[in-house]
Amino acid sequence: MQRFISVNTGNLLLSLSEITDIANPNIQAHQQRTAFIAMEIASMSGVDSDVLEDIFAAALLHDVGAISIEEKNELHALKMAESSFRNLDTHCIKGELLLKQTPWFNHIAKMVRYHHTDWKDMKFPIEDTDAFGAQIIYLSDLVERLIDRNVYILHQHENIIDIVKNLGSHIIHQKVVDLFLEVARKEEFWLDIVSPRLYHVLLHNGPFRNEMIGLDDIKHISKMYKDVIDFKSPYTATHTTGVEACANILSENFGFTSFEIQLMSIAANLHDIGKLAIPNKILEKKGKLTKEEFAVIKSHTYYTYYVINTIGGLERIADMAAYHHEKLNGEGYPFKCKSHEIGIGARIMTVSDIFTAITEDRPYRKGMDKNGVYSVFKSCIDKKEVDKRIVELLFDDYEKLEFNVKNKQSMAKDFYENRFLTYTGQIY
Ligand SMILES: [Fe+2]
Ligand SMILES: [Fe+2]
Ligand SMILES: [Fe+2]
């Protein structure tokens, strides 16, 4: 029996970073490309490997606070001139708050906080690692956005270099500009940025290539992504929290070991990570979805599977997380799994997901009471969609389960409303 998991740190971070940029060709691999540029500049400066890792990780996650695709598109489309006039602090502040909650990312939160701060407004010396890293990410992000994806890279790189030369040291510190100019002399650097194989370049040559990460850290990171996923929309701000709480109780009552319950917890935190690739205008639509819109929704568990499974070492978690819209009668989506392919973990996730979704209040409808929940599940059982044993477990001590789930959701709601939406960042 498997008792521990460990995965390559670089692969985990790259996969998680990729999901937010995956579905949109205009910003595809934006964070990876930014991280590559930042890594090259930081390496040129000769910093310690620890600092290099931090700058790389911060660059990979630099826009974690800009959660919706709509927000990301807007940021990406901003031209340089507008960038320095517009206050872009909101997503930096939100990114800092999310990262600060996670022990593993705590120390990169400041770099993310200041990744759009002009040098003239920075209150730390350039020798400060956070200031240095933030300036490198600022410049790397600008360079990445200056690249016209429709023009061959070596027909435009000299122009980009000229723009950076003329930025002025009030925006980016001269030391960082000089390092960039040294890196940018090589055509190889530019060809790497736009290479479709960049993921592999970063995986095999990046700072985390030989590092592994274990269960506890993966759990912490999945918890941060739980917030990222839920805070994408006020309508679902506590959804994943509810699914996780419910799946924990059901898997414990089913007789899962404590190790398996922890795997379930990670899987629950990530079960809807693929929704980061779906536009909010579809997720938040009040009326019935059109056939075309529903077809887009169907990709979310595909992306969940793709992201978790390709990390390597989390295959069991991928199954538990990504099969929550599969049905035992083979009519679910998008994998059309047969019942024998759907393990107990996935069956528990499905019931937890349905339970949480139908008991949640939405702006256009109230959450269901116990009778309503019962009739929904009865019809699911009649149609052979869900596992009857898990539904029975749900109703074994329904009131206690409902109380525990709601309790966790109200704590998450408090954090969302009173911290996330109102957080204004630190005075620097
Ligand atoms: Fe940004
Ligand atoms: Fe889902
Ligand atoms: Fe869900």
Image: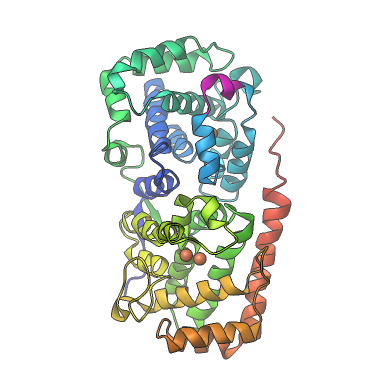
View extreme (front): residue: 290
Q: Position of residue 332 (x, y in %)?
A: 37, 73
Count of numbered labels shown in the rendering: 0
Colour scheme: rainbow
Confirm whether residue 247 shows in the render. Answer: no
Left or right: 117 as drawn, with respect to 327: right
Quadrant where the image shows the N terminus: bottom left
Q: Position of residue 82 (x, y in %)?
A: 58, 22
Between residue 347 and residue 132, name the one nearer to us.
347
Which image quarter: residue 260? bottom left
Between residue 160 and residue 289, name the one nearer to us.
289
Which contiguous range is marked in magenta? 78-84
Between residue 213 and residue 271, name the one nearer to us.
271
Q: Is residue 184 above or below residue 353?
A: above
Q: Is residue 353 above or below residue 328?
A: above
Q: Residue at x 49, y 67 (%)?
A: 265
Between residue 103 and residue 284, name the one nearer to us.
284
Q: Residue at x 62, y 83 (%)?
A: 372
Q: Position of residue 351 (x, y in %)?
A: 49, 77
Quadrant where the image shows the C terminus: top right
Which image quarter: residue 375? bottom right
Confirm whether residue 31 shows in the render. Answer: yes
Q: Is residue 143 above or below residue 292?
A: above
Dominant SS in magenta: helix
Q: Residue at x 66, y 72 (%)?
A: 406
Q: Position of residue 199 (x, y in %)?
A: 31, 41
Which image quarter: residue 234? bottom right
Q: Is residue 45 above or below residue 58?
A: above
Is 44 contained in the magenta span?
Answer: no
